[in-house]
Amino acid sequence: MELASAILYIAGALMLGLGAVGAAIGVGILGGKFLEGAARQPELIPMLRTQFFIVMGLVDAVPMIGVGLGMYVLFAVA
Amino acid sequence: MLKNSRSTRGHTQVVRQKTLLNIVYQLIAIGAIALLVSLKSWEWGYSALLGGLIYLIPYAYAANRILIDAAHTTAEQSANRTLADLYIGQIWKMVIGALLFALVFVLVKPLSPFSLFGTYIAVQALGWYLQMRADKRFIKL
């Protein structure tokens, strides 16, 4: 029983950790592209800002599902 | 330069209106899904409602913070400061989302995970669809 719950904790931690890695890579690339665009055309910063928000919604979607599943495993199953 | 600034401000206003409309559509979808699955059982119904709200509350917070600030952003504002603002908004969105998940899993029992995550993913997919429908140029990115 203890081994099973330990494996569940590891599974939850992996889900949270790998989700964080994916989100960090996506958000890092997005931020870099935002700075590139802003450096080329500073007058477009307000427009880039809204585009950043839209794309961020796509980038953080799957990691947040992973976070939710991880939380479920940690708080409700284990 | 001034013309560009006005056009980007107009763009921000349009995006704000579209985002608000998307949030209203998503809220309606959450209610409809919750009603529909509550026919199966009461537990499924409130789980679906919670799943939808866990997605929508952080999204609405981030949209409000980022897009309202965007209306006041000037071209002179540095890109670094703008990016820092965006990241702070995004971090709060994730923190609120994780906190809501934890609160629901600790406080609400019994809970139907299929209904909760199903609604969470469905509302998210609806958000993507509405976003692409609202801004056809976005598909070409």
Image (cartoon, rainbow, N blue to C red):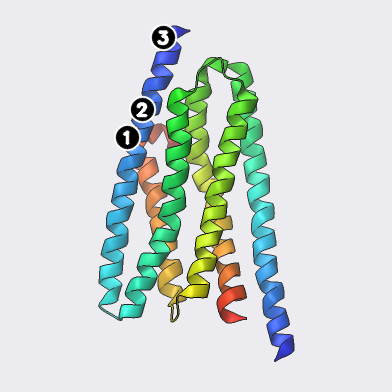
Check if mark 2 and mark 3 are on a common chain: yes
Residue linked to disc 2: B13
Coordinates of residue B64 in the picture (x, y in percent): 42, 39
Q: Chain of mark 3?
A: B
Q: Earlier in the sequence, mark 2 or mark 3?
A: 3
Are dots 2 and 3 in contact, CB under 8 Å? Answer: no
Residue linked to disc 1: B17
Which residue type carries mark 2?
Answer: Gln
Coordinates of residue A45 in the picture (x, y in percent): 53, 22
Q: Quadrant of residue A17?
A: bottom right
Residue linked to disc 3: B3
**Dot 1: what SS?**
helix
Which residue type carries mark 3?
Answer: Lys
Residue for point 42% across, 65% down: B51
Residue for point 39% across, 42% down: B131
Q: Nearer the viewer, residue B32 or B88?
A: B88
Q: Residue furthest bottom?
A: A1
**Dot 3: what SS?**
helix
Vertical comparison of B33 with B64: above or below: below
